[in-house]
Image (cartoon, rainbow, N blue to C red):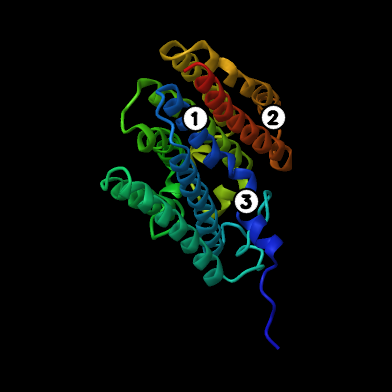
């Protein structure tokens, strides 16, 4: 009798839904920039959201697969991993990752066809970066470059790209918004890697947190949240003061920063991930609403 596969709930958990604000927030912020320029195209915004969500889910499954086959997830503190826990086979998780990347590719092709075809190259680069974060023989996530990838692709590319496919113009406010969103997205990864320093070091996964050590990683987390504040003020100066509605992100950010600076470890840092994800979502939503009403 065949062994039943993972349940739907297990696949949802493996997709790590708490990381999805990192995909939603840049699309909200980029659409806000487009709305301020009176160029918002809502169906393109929705397609950009599909691309971002599918890429995020694909990254999560790809990381699950690559870390699982390397044994990095053998002793995890955080959320359940499908391969590491034995819930799903490596092949099944790899197929799920490529299915998600396929969804992103289809939505991205529609955006490219209705905007400019060179965007196909940008989309391909995003998929390659997503896979080789922990995949391949020399994954850059194991070399301390994960935060760079997150800042570039879930900050700069996602926000500026979302605005561009709607307006086909470049705005300074879009760059500032992208820096702010990227900084908070990086803070999510920093908090995750801070929690995993002991297990990552033992598994040979040399993340930026492992390189910096505990105390400097905690400082970096706070600096990233402050960078998001500076970026937000820059957006407001370049556009409208109603963009400061995004300051609502400070509420969960302060709570998270207090937990980080208090020296929480292991499971004690899981609420930090949740709070930082909420902060990023509020940041993007605040920019969308603030820039739309101030246009």
- Label 1 or label 2, whichever lies nearer to me, is 1
User: Cα distance, mark 3 to mark 2?
Assistant: 25 Å
- The residue at the point 34 percent across, 49 percent down is 125
Residue 263, labelled with which disc?
A: 2
Residue 214, labelled with which disc?
A: none
| Residue of label 1 | 29
User: Cα distance, mark 1 to mark 2?
Assistant: 32 Å
- The residue at the point 64 percent across, 44 percent down is 18
From this view, report whether residue 30 is shown above or below residue 2: above
- SS at circle 3: loop
From this view, report whether residue 138 is shown above or below residue 216: below
**Would residue 211 be found to the left or right of residue 191 on screen?**
left
**Mark 3 or mark 1: whose residue is earlier in sequence:** 3
Res 283 → quadrant:
top right
Residue situated in front as seen by the camera: 168 or 18: 168
- SS at circle 2: loop
- The residue at the point 38 percent across, 55 percent down is 138
Residues at discs 3 and 2 in contact (Cβ within 8 Å): no
| Residue of label 3 | 16
**Mark 1 or mark 2: whose residue is earlier in sequence:** 1
Residue situated in front as seen by the camera: 193 or 236: 236
Residues at discs 3 and 1 in contact (Cβ within 8 Å): no
- SS at circle 1: helix
- The residue at the point 70 percent across, 28 percent down is 259
- Label 3 or label 2, whichever lies nearer to me, is 3
At which x and y percent is residue 42? Answer: 48, 38
From this view, report whether residue 79 is shown above or below residue 216: below
- Label 3 or label 1, whichever lies nearer to me, is 1
Residue 189 seen anywhere in this rendered image of the structure: no
Mark 3 surroundings: few (<14), some (14-19) or many (≥20) residues within 10 A: some
Res 255 → quadrant:
top right
At which x and y percent is residue 103? Answer: 46, 58
């Amino acid at each position: 009798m065949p062994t039943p596969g993972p349940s739907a709930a297990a696949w949802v958990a493996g997709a790590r839904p708490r990381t999805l604000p990192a995909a939603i927030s840049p699309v909200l912020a980029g659409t806000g920039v487009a709305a301020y320029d009176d160029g918002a195209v809502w169906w393109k915004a929705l397609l950009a959201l599909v691309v971002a969500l599918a890429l995020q889910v694909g990254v999560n499954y790809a990381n699950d697969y690559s870390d699982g086959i390397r044994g990095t997830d053998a002793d995890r503190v955080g959320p359940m991993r499908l391969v590491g826990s034995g819930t799903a086979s490596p092949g099944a998780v790899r197929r799920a990752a490529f299915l998600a990347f396929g969804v992103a590719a289809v939505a991205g092709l529609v955006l490219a066809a209705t905007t400019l075809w060179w965007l196909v190259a940008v989309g391909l680069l995003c998929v390659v970066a997503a896979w080789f974060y922990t995949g391949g023989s020399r994954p850059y996530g194991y070399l301390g470059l994960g935060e760079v990838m997150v800042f570039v692709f879930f900050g700069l590319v996602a926000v500026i790209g979302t605005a561009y496919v709607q307006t086909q113009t470049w705005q300074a406010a879009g760059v500032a918004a992208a820096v702010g969103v990227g900084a908070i997205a990086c803070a999510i990864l920093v908090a995750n890697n801070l929690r995993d320093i002991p297990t990552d070091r033992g598994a040979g996964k040399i993340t930026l947190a492992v390189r910096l050590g505990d105390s400097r990683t905690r400082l970096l987390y706070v600096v990233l949240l402050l960078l998001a504040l500076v970026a937000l003020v820059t957006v407001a100066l370049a556009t409208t003061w109603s963009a400061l509605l995004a300051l609502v992100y400070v509420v969960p950010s302060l709570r998270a920063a207090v937990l980080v600076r208090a020296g929480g470890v292991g499971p004690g840092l899981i609420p930090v991930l949740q709070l930082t994800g909420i902060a990023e979502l509020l940041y993007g939503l605040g920019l969308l609403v603030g820039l739309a009403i101030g246009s």
